[in-house]
Image: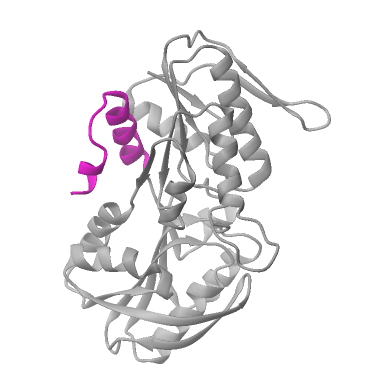
Amino acid sequence: MKIVACNSNRPLADAVAATLNLPLTKASIRRFADMEVFVEIQENVRGEDVFVIQSTSYPANDTLMELLVTMDALRRSSARRITAVMPYFGYARQDRKTASRSPISAKLVANLITVAGANRVLTMDLHAAQIQGFFDIPVDNLYAAPLYSRDIRERYEGRDVMIVSPDVGGVVRAREIARRLGCDLAIIDKRRERAGHSEVMNVIGEVEDRDCILVDDMVDSGGTHCNAAAALIARGARSASAYVTHGVLSGGAVARIVKSPIEMMTITDSIVATEDVKQAKNIRQVTIAPLMAEAMQRIHKEQSVSSLFD
């Protein structure tokens, strides 16, 4: 079993390798003067089960290209099996045609990953579950629900918690955490006029005097979650917090969240934290390294991954 780390999230790769008590495979991933990606695997990987860790986060095109070129290098080095470990799967929001003559880029990325040499994909909290069907190779989609359920139980012990889905599309995810915690579920009825901008329309559920926790797969601009938190407080909620798997946090998102009514936003380290995120008073990060490491170990040993979430 070998682990290759690309450049998008080295801290997570180091943590996963430490958990598995394995050194990272020596590899050189660098750029030519024109920013063309060049990869050289500096250890023998012939016949090995290789896991390539790379979140295709900002800059999405560069990190995706790094992953593709690295897998091609491994395939040409006679690796027995290549698993693309993508804690954050970029382009996942483009999972369907949203307008005439628009692409389904998630399917294109799935094709690229397969053609580059991946035999399997390991990812976490895909934006849309149907993306698994875009691949013709096995896909293991891990969930943050058990990790977040434990964290909420510890941090909110004795408080009247209500789980809230920030939109209709996230109800299944929020319901799973509500089920694990044995608490109620509320839904935000949201209208999105254009990409990156949303307007809260209504809150479905009795949130008055409750500690509301928004649950979502990703936060990008932060507008949805800030608006939702404000709506919950306006309707009498005692507090509004958020648990979001992928902290994309582009543009002025961090500043927006810091100024918002959100008591605390918890994100995972699927995307490496910027300095702004580290210094934000109401954003905290929890690690998914043990979960990713356990899943990789089970894949290597041909054991069940789904039983992690029973």
Q: Is residue 8 magenta?
A: no
Q: Residue at x 23, y 30 (%)?
A: 303
Q: Residue at x 37, y 20 (%)?
A: 22
Q: Main secondary structure of the magenta part?
A: helix
Q: Residue at x 62, y 39 (%)?
A: 63
Q: Residue furthest right?
A: 34
Q: How many marks?
A: 0
Q: Where is residue 259 drawn, in percent x and y?
A: 54, 75
Q: Nearer the viewer, residue 241 or 175?
A: 175
Along the line of sight, which residue is nearer the eye, 86 or 80? Answer: 80
In this rendering, position of residue 65 left or right of residue 132? right
Asked if the magenta segment contains residue 308, the reply would be yes
**What colour scheme does the image use?**
one colour
Picture quadrant of residue 85:
top left
Coordinates of residue 165 in the picture (x, y in percent): 37, 73
Q: Position of residue 151 (x, y in %)?
A: 27, 57
Q: Is residue 36 left or right of residue 156?
A: right
Residue 25 horizontal/vertical position (percent): 49, 18
Residue plotted at (28% across, 52% down): 147
Residue 240 appears anywhere in the view: yes
Write down the region rendered in magenta: 288-310
Q: Decide: is 57 above or below 252.
A: above
Locate the N terminus and report the quarter of the image it occupies: top left
**Quarter residue 217 falls in:** bottom left
Instruction: Specify whether residue 269 is in view.
Output: no
Give residue 199's quadrant in the image: bottom right
As displayed, is residue 177 above or below residue 60? below
